[in-house]
Structure formats: C-alpha cells, structure tokens
Image (spheres, coloured by chain):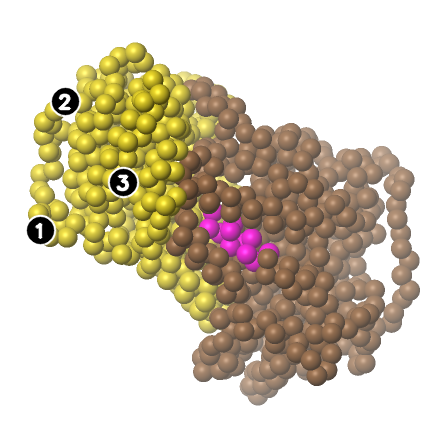
Chain colours: A yellow, B brown
Amino acid sequence: MEGVVVKLPSFPFLSPTISPSSPYSNCRLGFRRFSASLSAAVKKGSVSLGHSTRPDFPILHQEVNGSKLVYLDNAATSQKPTAVLKALQNYYEAYNSNVHRGIHYLSAKATDEYELARKKVAAFINASDSTEIVFTRNATEAINLVAYSWGLSNLRHGDEIILTIAEHHSAIVPWQIVAQKTGAIFEICSVLPIEDIVIWAHAVGAKVLVDACQSVPHMAVDVQGLDADFLVASSHKMCGPTGIGFLFGKSNLLLGMPPFLGGGEMISDVFLDHSTYAEPPSRFEAGTPAIGEAIGLGAAIDYLSGIGMQKIHDYEMELVNYLYEKLCSVPNIRIYGPKPSDNIHRAALCSFNVENIHPTDLATFLDQQHGVAIRSGHHCAQPLHRHLGVNASARASLYFYNTREDVDEFIRSLDDTVSFFNSFK
Amino acid sequence: MRKTMTEGVVVNLPSFPFLFHTVSPSSSNCRLGFRRFSASLSTAVKEGSVSLGHSTRPDFPILHQEVNGSKLVYLDNAATSQKPTAVLRALQNYYEAYNSNVHRGIHYLSAKATDEYELARKKVATFINASDSTEIVFTRNATEAINLVAYSWGLSNLKPGDEIILTIAEHPSAIVPWQIVAQKTGAILKFVNLDENEVPDMEELKEMISERTKLLVVQHVSNVLGSVLPIEDIVIWAHTVGAKVLVDACQSVPHMVVDVQDLDADFLVASSHKMCGPTGIGFLFGKSNLLLTMPPFLGGGEMISDVFLDHSTYAEPPSRFEAGTPAIGEAIGLGAAIDYLSGIGMQKIHDYEMELANYLYEKLCSAPNIRIYGPKPSDNIHRAALCSFNVENIHPTDLATFLDQQHGVAIRSGHHCAQPLHRHLGVNASARASLYFYNTKEDVVEFIRSLNDTVSFFYAFK
C-alpha cells in the first residue's frame, strides 16, 4: 500500500497559544502596512472603492433596530448589486425557459445565457475550458461531488487525505463520510500557500482540492497558475444569488470520474437496465439546473471584473489592516490568526473574543443597540475552535463595499458594548 | 414463489369503444364527438365570463412579447412554467431588503432571512398537507430529491435480490438514480408496461408486487402520455407487502390538489420551476419516521451537530439533508409561488386545465395524420393538460422549429426525458404541447392554426 504522508515545516508565528488563560491582547503597536502599492481609490482626497460601490447595493441603505445598518458578515454571505438583481429579473421576465433540449426561441436564449455564464466562470478563474466548470448548488455540494465521484472510485484502504485544522465543516464532513466507506485516513496540518501545497502534492501523485470560498470573491484566483486539481466556490459569497456554486476540475480528472447524481440531462442513452452518460460537465449536472441563478452569477462576475479583482484585493488589504489596528485597541481582545505583515497577508476578516464576554452577547448587543451585523458561533469550524480552546468567537468580515466609516462605527459600537458588559463586573 | 396478493383491489371499468385505438402510427386515432367529461364547469370558463387564463395572464410579464415576429404562444409548461410578478417581487425583495445567511446568525437580517426561509418550508408542507414542516427537505430540484432517497434510504435498505418497480414511462431522473443504486446493492429494477389505453398497466403492476418488492417509483402524472395514476391504490398495494412508494409529483403538484396524507405516500418529490417558482429549488417530502432513520447524503455545514477530527454527529431532519448554505432566495420565491397558486385555488386550476386539455385534444385530433400518445380523455380517464404527438412523415423537430420560427409557438420536441417510453412506442421523438392555467382557448386555437399551416408546408414537398 502506498500511504502518503506530507510532513510540513512549522512556522513559529503560526502557532497560536493554546492556553485559554494567556493574555488576551496579542497585538503589537506600529505593525507595518504591507500593501506594496496603494490603490488609487484610497489615496487621500479621492473616493474609496467602498464609497464608490455602496450605491450599487440597495440593501446597505437601511436602518436596523433604529440604527444605520453596518453589514460586517460578508464571510457568511455577500450582498448583491443592482446589476445582478436586474439580470435575474430579466431572465424571469423575458426568456425563462428550460435549457439544452428545446427548439424554441426562449429555450435557445436561456441555453445560450446559461452556457455563457459557465464561460464567464471559466474565464474568471482562468480555467482552460468551460467544460471544466460544473455548476452545483454551492461549494458544499461541489466538494461532495468530488468526494462521492472521485473519492469513492480512487481511494483505498490506508490512503491518506490531508486537511488543515481550520477547514470548514463542508470540507471535512464529506471526506469523513468517504473515509468511512473506503478506509482512507485523515491527517491534519497547518496553513500554507496553495501553489507550494500543489507542488508538494503532485510530487507524490496526490491531488489537491482547494476550498476557494473566501478567496475567489476577494482576489484574483488563477487555477492554471495554482495548478489546482479541483477548486470550489459559492456564488452567494461573491455578489451572486443563492442556489448556485461551482466545481472546477481539470478536464482529464472530470473525464475519468463516474457520475454522482443521476437523472435527466446527465445521460446519453437510457435503457431499462443501464444508462450511458454524457461528457463533463453535463455528466455532473442532473435535472433542470438553477438557470436564473447561474445567469445571476454571470452578472456578478461581470460586476466584479468591471471593478477588477486586484483593485478589490488591494482595497480590502488596506481596510483589513485598518480594522486589525483598530481592533487591537479594544481592551482585553484576542484576535485569532496571523498578524498582517509584509510576508503575511490576512483576509479582510477578524475572528476575536473579548475576555469574559460571550461572543453571542457581543453580537446581540451590537445588532440591537448599534445596527452592526457580525457573526458569532463556531463559524462552521468546530475543530479549529476546539484547537484554539474556545467554544465560539465573534467575527467581523468585510467586502469591497465596506468603508473606513463602517470600521470606525464598528469599533465605536464594540467599545460601547464592551463597556456595557464590563460595567456588570 | 410469489405470495398471492391478499388485498388486491380491482375496479372493473365499463368499456368505452373509443378508448381502444390502433397502435399503428399511420392511423388517425381520434373519433369525432367524444364526450366532454368535466362534471362541473368552472365558472371561470362559462361563456361570457373571464377565463382563468385571461384573468391570470396579466400577472406574467414574459407572455406579452413577440418572438420571431409573432405573438409568443408558450406551450412548453411541462418543461418549465413562467413566473408571476408576485414571485419576482418576493425574490427581488429578499435580495434588496434582507439577504443574509440563515440559521446561525444573530443579527437582524439573518433572523429575518431565517424566518422567511423556514416560513417557505411551512408553506410547502401546508400546500401538500404534510403533517409537519420537518417532513420537507429543500433540494435543487426533484432530480436531486430522488437521488437523496436513492443514496440515503436506498443504499441503507436495499439488498441483493430486492426489487424496485417503476413504469416504462418514468423520467430518467426517476430511473437513473435507481440504476446507480441497484448496481451498488444488487437490487433489481422491474418495469411496468403500458396497457391498451397507453397508460401504465395497473394490473401488471399489481401482479409484479411481491414480498421481494421494497420500493415503487411512479409518476403521478406522465409528462409524455398525460396519464394520471391512481396513487392511493398503488400505495395500498405496496404497503400490503411492506414496500415504500416514491411519487414523482413534478407534473401533478403544479396542476392539482396533492395531499400526501390522503395518498399516504412515503416519499414525494417536485420542482419549484414547474410550479411558478424560481429555478434552483425543489423539495422532497418524506414521512417523519423514514427521514429520522435515514443516514445523511451530502455532508457539510448546517447538517452536522458536532464535528470531530475523525467523525461527526448529525442534525435531525430536515437539516440533516441540507448541507451548506441553502438556496435561500429561491426557497422564499417558491413560498411566494405557493401563495399565488393557493390564492387561485388548485381545484379551480385543475378544473380549468381539464376544460382546456379536452379542448386541445379535440382540436388536435383534427390535424391530418396525427397520432396523439396516451389515453383518450373520458369520464373515467383524466388526461393532464398536455399532448405528445407525431404527424406522419414529418419529424417533430421540424414541426417545432417551423412553429417557433414562423408562428412564435413554443412547443418541445425530442424524447422529453423519456427514452424508454419512446422506444416502447416505437418512435425516436415526439412533439409536445403542454398547457398551464395562464393559457387560453385562443392559445390553443392559434396553436392548431399554426400546426395546420406547418403540416401543409411540409406536405407541400411530398
């Protein structure tokens, strides 16, 4: 048996202190801004990306519980610009029809737009061909597709699957299910850059499945540059509708994979005792697709591309540095994950705890008294929280339509919240 | 040895000569003057008052356009339905006002999104008279719902030699998941053929049921034949031997009252896009006691209780079967579609469609050399509001193309996702016109006029 074990180098500043009693404040003053080139949008005197895009998002302009909404829950889901809502509306009002097997005008148009959306996804992540894009309900289903199709037909007893302790449940549980069925084994490691992971994995003939839910919406992701074997993402996290996501799989891999869901659309011929199957991607898309939603995702990609992913990323790096710096000033706060520096980029989110205040209390007070929307809980990462020695954390997560004022308001509200709860002690 | 059916129910129907027709594709199978069977005329179609089609059409923006220079006549409803403004508004309102992730959020938007999503689930439950909303699992479509039953219930309950009974008219979405599961478990698929009325043969089905039968998978309404199966009877026969019944209700739930408690169905599936709702959402109904014992299908966030490194524990149904972020907006849109349909009333919709279906059938009979598949409508045999047909010597794709390009009439041609059925009928493909409550007599008249023109055009070359 050829068990595969990857031994990974450890990075000192990546090891979190595990003891729950350690000092909560883990911020150093004066950490360096690392963004090599300041995006023009945030130079003093010009309009920031957040300010210029906010008018496109109707939902952001409302009051919640008597306060202006400050939406900082983007890692859970993103808001949708008017352009996407218009595309969705237009589909249903003008050419809604079933795809792929129709002759008439509406059906032909719906089919064209649906397949155009597939091409847009392919171009967005630089897949070599749109046949490498399979539409799913969300990234979770995409991972299950790889697990049930590629996993069940390729994994044998003793084979090893390596994940990180920080993986989302949607990346862990499907592989637990498949491991139970095949006898494969889990290994856990710490966080590392994708391109390197892929090189190391390919050196031993292993495949890499990249969960890109929090990257595709926020930065340029190039699957050919990464040489990833599989990559998944969800539309609703990248300004697109709910109900649609995608799997990228290298052509040669998809071609070798048996079907997952069976039904109409994915077949070639249906006989009573057996069926023959379509080529990818149709092989993995059973039944009527989420047509309107795919077209909405295409519109979201148009919108994001119109801004530019590098510009979005640069702006978010500025904003997250600002968030991190400000958050550090909150008394007795513990922020999880790496400090941003020249070498370490943080995504535009911070999970944190404030000593002696339950994150759910924080989040509730922030929402009810200040209209600030953050999330609290285990964020679908129970193993990580267990490893960090906590039950739950609070999380503020940004997107390109957030502004410095949002961050200021959040910090001000958080200070007020902390004072409120500390006054009882 | 097959155990004798202890409680078979046989209904001897009086014979009607016009129900027997020759199978040869060259003969015209319509007799003039067949009886209208609709017992009570819906007031909406009484002469002089506004029909349901006319009163609802203004709600459907898509219907008011021209296609290829002609007014659109949309007769492809069995493939997908159109959406009323109320549904589009609900979808729009979700995204503009309270879009947020559900179930695990504290803040205002999240709480509202969660409430509306769960309210949509309740609406589905009420619509089909499920006893509890926990019996409703949201899926992408009916196809995924059937796969859920196959992978979850099927893989953990089927053993070599167990039998699954389907009909020859089933959609691939009802056949292929069970072929996959049969390969993995050693179960055997058996198919019921058509009787002389071109409906699945209930006598043959009864005889096929034995103690080896574990599951029956049946379409409530056939998307090709227009036949309606006696689900209540099928369920009684199945339960007598301890078999379960999975009802494919894709073509029934949108068009008539469907009551899962009356039917006593074990599983039932349907798709939103066929019932005035958005794409990307469908549902599985499963009896509570069944769902509770079923292992998970898709793994991930939302469907777990606790996640450890080497194993996880799972949530109760329906969450157990809903992994990852759901199609929140789409579920809410489906809820709005149910509100819209309920506002009209499913009985009223059904009655109107029966009138229209009879009118369509009667008119279609008058087209030269036409062969309509499925049963003739009568007092005892209800046809759904669709007709699959062939015209001698004209390929259905040519028919459909000409109808679209010259007349703006949208029908479908092909095997309608029913290859085994078409093989059984001895054809490669057929054309299909399928109606919904927003169609009118004028749509049917225009269709027939266009069809006659089309047939004349192609015959001019012969």
Q: Which mark is residue A398?
A: 3
Residue at image location 56% in from the left, 46% down from the top? B119
| Residue B419: % across, % down | 61, 57
| Residue A393: % across, % down | 35, 26
Image: magenta residue range: B328-338
Number of residues whose C-alpha sits closer than 10 Å to that of mark 2, classed few (under 14), some (14–19) or many (20 or more): few
Dot 2 corresponds to which residue? A28
**Residue B339 lies in quadrant:** bottom right
| Residue A108: % across, % down | 44, 67
Q: Could you tell which of marks 1 and 2 lies nearer the N-terminus?
A: 2
Q: Is residue A367 left or right of residue B206?
A: left
Q: SS at mark 3? A: loop
Vertical position of residue A100 compared to residue B103: above or below: below
Residue most extreme to the bottom: B460
Q: Could you tell which of marks 1 and 3 lies nearer the N-terminus?
A: 1
Residue in front for this viewpoint, A272 or A70: A70
Residue at image location 73% in from the left, 39% down from the top? B244
Q: Chain of mark 2?
A: A
Q: Are marks 3 and 2 on the same chain?
A: yes
Dot 1 corresponds to which residue? A45
Number of residues whose C-alpha sits closer than 10 Å to that of mark 3, classed few (under 14), some (14–19) or many (20 or more): many
Does the image show residue B227?
A: yes
**Residue A154 lies in quadrant:** top left
